[in-house]
Every structure is written in structure tokens, then in C-alpha cells.
Amino acid sequence: MIFCITTERLLLEDMNREDLVSMMQLARDPRVMKYVFIWLENDEQVAGFVQHAIDESVRADRQDYVLAVRVAGTGEFAGFAMLEIDPEQPTTAEVGCILVPGCWKSGYASEILRALLAFGFGRLSLHRIYGKCDDLNHASAHVMEKCGLQYEGTLREHVWLRDHWRSSRYYGMLAGEYRPDVP
Ligand SMILES: CC(C)(COP(=O)(O)OP(=O)(O)OC[C@H]1O[C@@H](n2cnc3c(N)ncnc32)[C@H](O)[C@@H]1OP(=O)(O)O)[C@@H](O)C(=O)NCCC(=O)NCCS
């Protein structure tokens, strides 16, 4: 059965092979990938990533939810979202999302993050959910702050990311801090 989270305007559902072309287009766009710390540098890496998402979707003890984001009603591919359970610490998960530029600034990322928090703290009974972003990725930082994640610190210049040293800002929320009713 296909896993699907429904939000007001979006569907977050298991990827399929037909998403590969959209995923390749997304990964080839330097505006999208500028601050993204996932290695999707060529079509082969994207194909491996999509295959991993599909393999995880049928695993009995699933740990990674790598989900295609589609606009409800039209089914238009809007990007992808992730909730990845830490294999060393299964009460913790990392969340994130990457959207096509035509979908930016519509509040989609905030809608997605709220849905992942509800899923993670609700159905998965997680204790801690966190996200991280490039120090220069102000939109991403803003989304996490807006959704109530607390800034926890910055790991400074820990990796060379394509054209700059990346510093990662970490944001987290604990189960006891989660307020489902706060928009
Ligand atoms: C980061 C990203 C997910 C945000 O998606 P989005 O749907 O535009 O996010 P939202 O519309 O929910 O919210 C964006 C917020 O950031 C603000 N924002 C946008 N660009 C900004 C910038 N350069 N500086 C500061 N704030 C910015 C918006 O005004 C909005 O805030 P508001 O709702 O208070 O007005 C999207 O830009 C994206 O996919 N970028 C490329 C991939 C990426 O960087 N992903 C995150 C990896 S950690």
C-alpha cells in the first residue's frame, strides 16, 4: 500500500520510478541545490537516491520516509520531503524538504514540516525531531523557526559544499514541546 500524508494543499507520498525525471530536473537546478547537503550531483546519484526511497518504502522496519510532494488535485510534482530515523538513536529523526522553484514562497515548506512533525511525534512516537540547514539558507532557517523548532547551534564550516565551506545551523523540537494546534 502506498504511504501518503495529506495536508491542506499537498500529498506527501511514496516515490515511484516515474518521479525519476522530475527528480533529475530538480537536482540539475543550481538554484535548488545551492545549499543542499545531499549528493545528487549527477543522474546516476539521483537514480540511486530514488531507488533507495523505493526500497525503503517496502521495508518492514522502514527508517527513511523519502516522499514525493505533489499538489493535491493536479498531482503536479512539487519536490520531495524526508523524515529519516537515526539508526543509532531510533527515537530521533531528521526532517527536510526540497521544492521546485515555482513552488517556493507559497508556504508549502511550512505545511510540509508541520505535517512531518505531526507524523513523527504522533504515529512514530518520536522523542526528538531536528532539521539542519546551511548558515546561508535563510528561507530554510525561517521555515524551521516559524514551525517552532529551536535553534540549537551551528557546526562551523564542516564540509566543502560545491563552492563554499558549509556551516550547518541545527534546529530541534522535543516531543514535550510539540503543540499540534499551533499553526
Ligand atoms: C527552503 C525551501 C524549502 C523553502 O520553501 P518555501 O515553500 O518557499 O517555504 P515557505 O513558503 O513555507 O516559507 C518560506 C519563508 O521564508 C521566507 N524567505 C524566503 N526566502 C527568504 C530569504 N532569502 N531570506 C529570508 N527569508 C526568506 C519567506 O518569506 C517565508 O516566510 P513567511 O512565511 O514568514 O513570509 C525552498 O526554498 C527550497 O526548496 N529551497 C531549495 C532546497 C533547500 O534549500 N531546501 C532546504 C534544505 S535544508
Image (cartoon, rainbow, N blue to C red):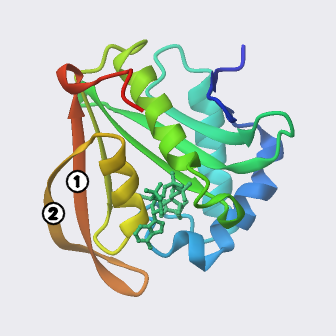
Indicate if the residue with disc 2 has its beta carbon within 8 Å of ligand 1.
no
Say which residue appears at 37% left-offset and 21% top-offset: 180
**Which quadrant does the N terminus fall into?**
top right
Q: Nearer the viewer, residue 62 or 104?
A: 104
Q: Measured from the top left, where is residue 81 in percent x and y?
A: 55, 43
Q: Nearer the viewer, residue 60 or 178?
A: 178
Q: Amino acid at mark 1?
A: Tyr
Q: Earlier in the sequence, mark 1 or mark 2?
A: 2
Say which residue appears at 54% left-offset and 71% top-offset: 33
- Check if mark 1's residue and mark 2's residue have beta carbons within 8 Å: yes
**Which quadrant does the C terminus fall into?**
top left
Q: Measured from the top left, where is residue 154 in percent x and y?
A: 15, 63
Q: Quadrant of residue 87?
A: top left
Q: CA distance from mark 1 to mark 2?
A: 6 Å
For the residue labelled by badge 2, is the local secondary structure a helix, a strand or a loop? strand
Residue matched to label 2: 154
Q: Quadrant of residue 44?
A: bottom right
Q: Is residue 44 visible?
A: yes
Q: Amino acid at mark 2?
A: Thr
Q: Is residue 11 visible?
A: no
Residue matched to label 1: 170
Say which residue appears at 61% left-offset and 61% top-offset: 104
Q: Measured from the top left, where is residue 169 in percent x and y?
A: 23, 61
Classify mark 2: residues with Cα within 10 Å, few (<14), some (14-19) or many (20+).
Answer: some
For the residue labelled by badge 1, is the local secondary structure a helix, a strand or a loop? strand
